[in-house]
């Protein structure tokens, strides 16, 4: 079974631009979560989508947004990019959005560099 | 406020010996704990998990122990192999509504020496 895929793998943008990252979950998984990894803050939860609805949200500004499509694929968008947005953005999928024993499986990430 | 802490940024172990990675948490509402392994420029790979109703879970060379009273969990790898060299993250989640919101520790870099 194919794993979580993320596109693009690498991205370079300049301050003020916006960016859209894409994530395709494991087949049959309906929940998609996004995380940001930076050297200073570690891995931090951004938000989670299930059945096209945002179910959980982390402590990030409104410049960070996302959506989920009917086929469970998800996109996240960052507007008005700042230098501090440079990070590895990870997507994780799981079967459901309930039951705390539902394991999340991660994609390889998108490395975003903001110049 | 760091709710999940891995106090050892690095650990070096000889091949064949036991590796013990530790993790502490502060939020008593956490009820599911996971360990992930991560190589540079890759996403975390799930290793093993444990529910708060258990105190031990084994999967091959990997065993996770949970001490709820101490709010402490540990990952034991026996025997350690060179391919185990990576950064290990401990993560926790709470309850039904927040189940997909994993809170991660800062990671421990494990190096297995031949």
Image (tube, rainbow, N blue to C red):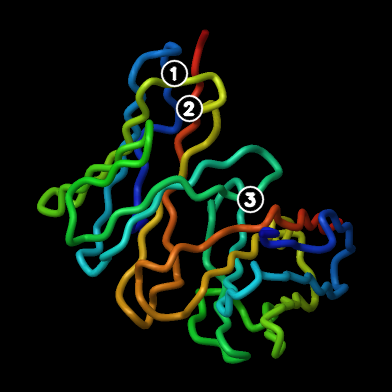
**How far is mark 3 from mark 2, CA to CA?**
17 Å
Identify the residue shown where x is 83% and y is 72%: A19
| Residue pointed to by mark 3 | B43
Is A93 on the left or on the right of B71, as rendered?
A: right
What is the x, y in percent for residue B92? 36, 59
Precedes in sequence: disc 2 or disc 1: 1
| Residue pointed to by mark 1 | B12
Labels 2 & 1 near each other (Cβ < 8 A): yes
Precedes in sequence: disc 1 or disc 3: 1
Identify the residue shown where x is 61% and y is 69%: A34
| Residue pointed to by mark 2 | B110
A97, above or below B13, in the image: below
Identify the residue shown where x is 70% and y is 90%: A70
Q: Chain of mark 3?
A: B
The outermost residue toward the front is A1
Q: Quadrant of residue A52?
A: bottom right
What is the x, y in percent for residue A46? 57, 71
The outermost residue toward the top is B114
What is the x, y in percent for residue B31? 26, 65
Q: Quadrant of the N terminus of chain B?
A: bottom left
Q: Are marks 1 and 3 on the same chain?
A: yes
Judge by depth and name the residue closer to the eye, A96 or B106.
A96
Q: Chain of mark 2?
A: B
């Amino acid at each position: 079974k194919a794993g979580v895929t993320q596109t693009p793998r690498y991205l370079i943008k300049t301050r003020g631009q916006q960016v859209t990252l894409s994530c395709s979950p494991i087949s049959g998984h309906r929940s998609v979560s996004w995380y940001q990894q930076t050297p200073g803050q570690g891995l931090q939860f951004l938000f989670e989508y299930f059945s096209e609805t945002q179910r959980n949200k982390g402590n990030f500004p409104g410049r960070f947004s996302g959506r989920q499509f009917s086929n469970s694929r998800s996109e996240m968008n960052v507007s008005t990019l700042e230098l501090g947005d440079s990070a590895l953005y990870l997507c994780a999928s799981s079967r459901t959005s309930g039951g705390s024993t539902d394991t999340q499986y991660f994609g390889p990430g998108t490395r975003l560099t903001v110049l | 406020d760091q709710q999940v802490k891995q106090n050892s940024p690095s650990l070096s172990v000889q091949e064949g010996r036991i590796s013990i990675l530790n993790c502490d948490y502060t939020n008593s509402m956490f009820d599911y704990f996971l360990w992930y392994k991560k190589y540079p420029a890759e996403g975390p790979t799930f290793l093993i998990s444990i529910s708060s109703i258990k105190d031990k879970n084994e999967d091959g060379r990997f065993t996770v122990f949970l001490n709820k009273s101490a709010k402490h969990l540990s990952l034991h790898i026996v025997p350690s192999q060179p391919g185990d060299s990576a950064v290990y993250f401990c993560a926790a989640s709470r309850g039904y509504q927040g189940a997909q919101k994993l809170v991660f520790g800062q990671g421990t870099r494990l190096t297995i020496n031949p």
